[in-house]
Image (tube, helix red, strand yellow):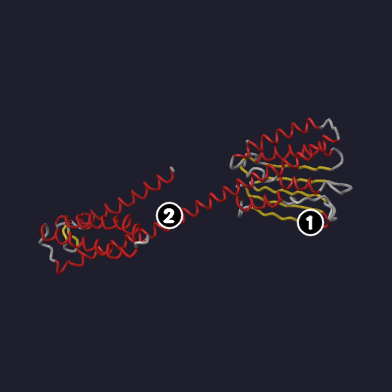
Amino acid sequence: MASLNTRQKREVAVHIGIWATILLLPYLVSSAGEGYKIGGLPAAFFVMAGIIHAAIFYFNAFYLYPELANSRRWWLYVPCAAALIAASFAVKYQLIVRLFPEIMLKNSGGLVFGPSIFVFAASIAYRRITDGIRKERARKEYEAQQVAAELKLLRSQVNPHFLFNVLTNMVALARQKSDRLEGALIRLADLMRYMTYDTQATQVTLQQETDYLKSYIELQKLRFSDAMRIELAIQTDADGLPIEPMVLIPFVENAFKHGASWLDEPYVSIDLKVAGGLLALRVENPYDSHPDAAKDDHSGIGLENVRTRLKLIYPDKHSLVIDDRNNIFTITLNLNLL
């Protein structure tokens, strides 16, 4: 609302400046020795005519055109417009007859009556242009709201999907009656705190996102113990850079989900580097292409989700390459955080 008020104040100031210049034009371009005249018209008449022109401009731009030309009563607009111009002619004529008889209508009629038509046409152009700008601004605001709503929906989809997978891991530990369950629950509490509170912001710091990533990986280490080789390398020179929350975890989550089943030597390799504001993430895991390999109806939700989020938030600042040759699934994400 504050920006809207500022915009309105700026528009009012521009209008005041333009009309003040028009009304004072005789005093700006003429001199006292010349009687402050423009085309033989005295300054006093020029100022009065300017007030009439301002009335034509704003009455048509803010009432007549919006109320009639853009409504079902459009057919009334032409006679009303003609009446408005005719009324301005009549008022000007009376001013000349009563106050400025020295003005010769025969020689100055174009200067006296012509501006009414010009100002009327200018008011139509102004109304159409401002309506177009307003519609375009409203369209952009609507699109921004749509993007914000879509991002909110996508984020809400990330959390339940991720939570479902983590709770599945917890069930596995519970069935094993593992003493690692308590540590896993503590890690889960940390993750839930991040998902519930920190991710409500539009962006988080890179440090927060990488800490979250580390907690998730530690949780997976508790689950798999020595059954899976997990490699993690994080190098960053700018922990304070802003980043979309939970934009990295879907790639790692996908690697653990599909790289942990039906394999003799499963592993997940995660390499994250940030230098000069450029983030490079590489996640690699083997997978089983056998049709009976463990999959569910929701496979791929996380990747499609984050792909959409990247397009919305970093449309020209990211590249995502997915390679699944030779039963090795590799994602490479390059992201400009500046």
User: In the image, is residue 211 above or below residue 247?
Assistant: above
The label shown at residue 269 is: none
**Residue 172: image location, x then y, percent:** 82, 38
**Residue 272: image location, x then y, percent:** 72, 45
Tag count in the figure?
Answer: 2
Residue located at (33% from left, 65% from top): 75
- What element does badge 2 sit on? helix
Residue located at (65% from left, 48% from top): 278
Q: Amino acid at mark 2?
A: Arg
Residue located at (85% from left, 42% from top): 228
Residues at marks 2 and 1 touching, judged by CB atoms closer than 8 Å = no
**Residue 36: image location, x then y, percent:** 17, 57
Tell me: 82 left or right of 201.
left
Task: Name the residue nearer the viewer: 163 or 259.
Answer: 163
Tell me: 92 left or right of 319.
left
**Residue 37: image location, x then y, percent:** 17, 59
Classify 10 Å Cα crowding around label 1: few (below 14), some (14-19), many (20 and above).
Answer: some
Reading the image, the residue beneath label 1 is 324
Task: Name the residue nearer the viewer: 70 or 192.
Answer: 70
Q: Looking at the figure, which quarter contains the N terminus?
A: top left
Asked where in the image residue 132 lies, by quadrant, the reply is bottom left
Farthest residue, direction bottom: 106
Residue located at (46% from left, 53% from top): 137
Q: Amino acid at mark 1?
A: Asp
Asked where in the image residue 78 lies, by quadrant, the reply is bottom left
Reading the image, the residue beneath label 2 is 134
User: In the image, is residue 84 above or below residue 6?
Assistant: below
| Label 2 or label 1, whichever comes before in sequence order | 2
